[in-house]
Image (cartoon, coloured by chain):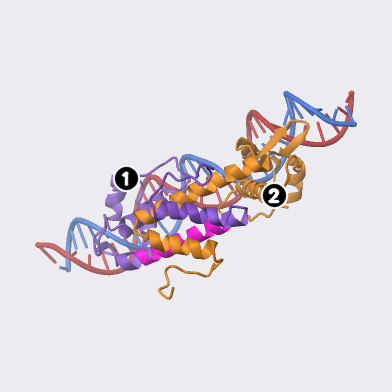
Chain colours: A purple, B orange, C red, D blue
DNA sequence: GTATTGTATTATTGTAAATAATACATTAAG
DNA sequence: CTTAATGTATTATTTACAATAATACAATAC
């Protein structure tokens, strides 16, 4: 269910957190689906229960899951999670674009690239190649 | 010349590296401009020479500066650095957009947002608000 | 030859992630 | 009510790495 990269600079708990959020937003995990118990998942992944708990806690903090002592952890409303995810992604996107423009990238080239990628599905489009 | 945030999660040497690359790509530093000596900059910033050296080494690794023992460190061709920067930024941008779409964001909404931001300068535009 | 510069090495310190080992709290099941 | 399973919290330890400190070496300019 989860894939960990121990060589990554990203902490394990962040990797877990990110992947879990993606599963929720991507619809793989449905509303009220029960997540593996902290100890169970820790066993499966070969990590410490505290590490899994940290990931679960962060997911709950942003409202993507709900954890209840004695019962377990459950996926909350996917629509709301999707909203959270969208907001986050658009924030990242805006920051990246602002920084790019601030340091000299041509806004029109950015629009052309994004359009080619999103509208025409031309994922091979490379704005740094003059052939376009 | 450089501003360090000691509370940041980013290591000092990465902050230095990033800021130096921006100065080069942004045209503040011209071709063949000599950078401060490792020891000098370390003194000015109140950090260890090794930390500065690490930042310089990384800038040289990607070809943005050239360091010569006994002479100093110098800005290399800004056009090439800009190319490198553009390639990197567009790679990040594509990855972010692909991931966003993969997990449900509407490609048209992305295009609209990017267009509003880049073409119209409407940095307040929020694609997650229905008022638009 | 001396000073300045970049580079390399070794040891030490500080911080944070991750682990380990428990303990406590709540819920479900019997 | 007892037991098991669950989430949560705490403390100590280990580990990794950034950063420092103190040198040493290498190449260049004067």
Residue furthest out toward the front: A131
Residue C30 vertical position relative to residue B60 in the rendered view, above or below: below
Instruction: Judge by depth and name the residue closer to the eye, A89 or B47.
Output: A89
How many discs mark residues in the rendered view?
2
User: Which span of residues is magenta-colored?
Assistant: A82-98
Quadrant location of residue A66?
A: bottom left
Instruction: Judge by depth and name the residue closer to the eye, A4 or A87.
Output: A87
Residue A95 image offset from top left, x and y in percent? 53, 59
Residue B81 vertical position relative to residue A57 in the rendered view, above or below: above
Residue at coordinates 28% horizontally, 45% vertically from top-left?
Answer: A44
Residue D15 vertical position relative to residue B68 in the rendered view, above or below: below
Which residue in the structure is indicated by mark 1?
A45
Query: Circle 2 sits in a helix, a strand or a loop, which is it?
Result: loop
Query: Circle 1 sits in a helix, a strand or a loop, which is it?
Result: helix
Residue B76 image offset from top left, x and y in percent? 69, 38
Residue C9 image offset from top left, x and y in percent? 64, 28
* Circle 1 residues within 10 Å: few <14, some 14–19, many ≥20: some
Q: What kind of secondary structure does the magenta stretch mostly adopt?
A: helix
Residue A132 belongs to magenta span: no
Asked whether the viewer can see residue B9, the reply is yes
The chain under label 1 reads A
The numbered mark at residue B27 is: 2
The chain under label 2 reads B
Instruction: Judge by depth and name the residue closer to the eye, B94 or A25.
Output: B94
Residue at coordinates 40% horizontally, 42% vertically from top-left?
Answer: A5
The numbered mark at residue A128 is: none
* Circle 2 residues within 10 Å: few <14, some 14–19, many ≥20: some
Residue at coordinates 28% horizontally, 63% vertically from top-left?
Answer: A75
What is the spatial separation of the Cα atoms under label 1 and label 2, in whole angstroms? 48 Å
Quadrant location of residue B122?
A: bottom right
């Amino acid at each position: 269910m989860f894939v960990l990269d121990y060589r990554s600079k990203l902490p394990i708990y962040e990797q877990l957190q990110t992947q879990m959020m993606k599963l929720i937003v991507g619809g793989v995990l449905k509303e009220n689906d029960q997540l593996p118990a902290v100890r169970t998942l820790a066993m499966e992944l070969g990590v410490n229960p505290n590490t899994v708990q940290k990931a679960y806690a962060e997911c709950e903090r942003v409202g993507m899951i709900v954890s209840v002592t004695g019962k377990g952890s459950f996926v909350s409303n996917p629509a709301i999670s999707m909203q959270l995810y969208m907001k986050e992604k658009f924030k990242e996107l805006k920051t990246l674009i602002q920084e790019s423009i601030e340091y000299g990238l041509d806004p029109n080239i950015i629009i052309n690239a994004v359009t080619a990628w999103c509208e025409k599905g031309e994922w091979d489009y490379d704005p740094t190649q003059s052939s376009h």
